[in-house]
């Protein structure tokens, strides 16, 4: 009689994941409670009836422009590893956005990396390297944007703190990128593969370094950096247009300051669609520039809905057309991680 097989010890991981998810939703709920505490719902209802909808639709379309920019940028960064059309890149990007909207902790980032790998024929970890460069570009332009805004408008203390944090992070990331691309070398005498979590981290860093070296030494790297600047411009202009559509008459520079402050706060993974945290940061930023809390709270919901409608619709269509299921993507990504250690 054969001995019973031991049951895999998954309870701790399961409980840990459940705790993380519950904590994320708890934070989102607490943020929403603060946003709508002391809000005059009578005034809020009147504000919604006075929204200028043609202007609101224009703001929605302008915000979609930033994803066109991101598509071109990512396509340029992926080109050293494989061939993928702009349409497939756009589809993959929006599929990831859609999954980020409905699932916590930015699961969509893993999904879009896998889909891009499948469509382009590039290695999964090479695609991850291209995404790492995207984050670096975002940090550089965010830091530059906050620096420019700080020269033109007096920023509140909390925004200045955020500016210092993102500026320091962007500088450190850029310095690390230069080191990995131009100075760090691998070779046949590299340390042997290790098992466990530490080994996984070492392997991830090594494969990412190799991908960064490929990207950083092509002329398309600089082209994609330039294209990245339009991403933040589209989003700031869209935010400003929607502010005016809602009835908040603030100059473009103030819209830029508030939006950049929100971006800093959303760096940490949180609830699906950034619900709760976005509204909290939006209200906090607008309050700093003298906007009434009721008006700020109403706008935070209005802007959230206007930018998420196209993301949900286009993202859902993109994910359905990919022919993949989330469970299958997770399983295949897990198998890629295991095979990379062998």
Image (spheres, rainbow, N blue to C red):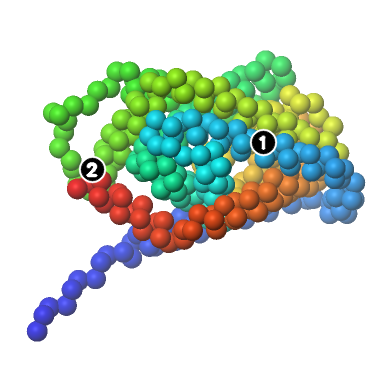
Q: Secondary structure at mark 1?
A: helix
Furthest residue in direction bottom, as rendered: 1
Q: Residue 227 lies in what quarter of the image?
A: top right
Residue that appears at 16% across and 77% down: 4
Taking 238 as reference, is 332 left or right?
Answer: left
Closer-to-camera residue (63/105): 63
Residue that appears at 72% across and 36% down: 62
Q: Secondary structure at mark 2?
A: helix
Percent x, y of residue 240 = 76, 33
User: How far is mark 2 from mark 1, CA to CA?
Assistant: 40 Å
Taking 277 as reference, is 338 left or right?
Answer: left
Percent x, y of residue 48 = 85, 50
Q: Is residue 341 above or below residue 130?
A: below
Taking 18 as reference, is 254 left or right?
Answer: right
Q: Residue 126 lies in what quarter of the image?
A: top left
**Quarter placement of the N terminus:** bottom left
Percent x, y of residue 175 = 40, 20
Residue that appears at 63% across and 50% down: 314
Taking 191 as reference, is 108 left or right?
Answer: right
Tally the numbered discs. Answer: 2
- Say whether residue 310 is visible: yes
Residue that appears at 37% across and 40% down: 122
Residue 311 disc label: none
Residue 199 disc label: 2
Mark 1 lies on residue: 65
Mark nearer the N terminus (2 vs 1): 1
- Say whether residue 292 is visible: no
Q: Is residue 272 above or below residue 175?
A: below
Furthest residue in direction top, as rendered: 151
10 Å crowding of disc 1: few (<14), some (14-19), many (20+): some
| In contact (CB < 8 Å): disc 2 and disc 1 | no
Closer-to-camera residue (168/62): 62
């Amino acid at each position: 009689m054969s001995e019973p097989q031991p049951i895999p010890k998954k309870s701790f991981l399961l409980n840990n994941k459940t705790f993380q998810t519950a904590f994320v939703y708890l934070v989102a709920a607490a943020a929403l409670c603060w946003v709508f505490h002391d809000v005059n719902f009578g005034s809020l209802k009147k504000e919604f009836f006075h929204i200028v909808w043609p202007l609101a639709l224009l703001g929605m379309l302008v915000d979609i422009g930033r994803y066109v920019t991101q598509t071109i940028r990512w396509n340029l960064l992926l080109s050293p590893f494989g061939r993928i059309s702009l349409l497939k890149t756009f589809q993959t990007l929006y599929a990831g956005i859609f999954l980020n909207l409905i699932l916590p902790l930015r699961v969509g980032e893993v999904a879009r990396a896998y889909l891009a790998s499948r469509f382009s024929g590039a290695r999964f970890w090479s695609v991850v390297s291209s995404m790492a460069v995207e984050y670096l570009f975002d940090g550089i332009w965010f830091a530059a944007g906050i620096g420019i805004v700080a020269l033109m408008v007096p920023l509140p203390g909390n925004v200045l703190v955020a500016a210092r944090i993102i500026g320091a992070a962007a500088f450190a990331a850029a310095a690390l990128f230069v080191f990995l691309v131009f100075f760090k070398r691998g070779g046949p005498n590299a340390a042997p593969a290790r098992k466990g979590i530490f080994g996984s981290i070492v392997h991830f860093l090594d494969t990412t370094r190799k991908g960064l070296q490929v990207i950083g030494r092509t002329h398309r790297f600089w082209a994609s950096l330039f294209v990245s600047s339009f991403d933040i411009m589209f989003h700031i202009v869209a935010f400003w247009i929607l502010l005016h559509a809602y009835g908040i008459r603030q100059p473009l520079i103030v819209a830029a300051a508030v939006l950049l402050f929100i971006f800093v706060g959303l760096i940490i993974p949180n609830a699906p669609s950034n619900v709760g945290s976005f509204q909290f940061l939006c209200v906090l930023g607008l309050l700093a520039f003298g906007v009434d809390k009721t008006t700020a709270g109403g706008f935070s919901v209005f802007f959230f809905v206007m930018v998420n409608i196209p993301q949900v619709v286009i993202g859902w269509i993109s994910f359905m057309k990919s022919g993949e299921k989330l469970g299958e993507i997770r399983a295949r990504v897990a198998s890629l991680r295991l095979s990379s250690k062998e």
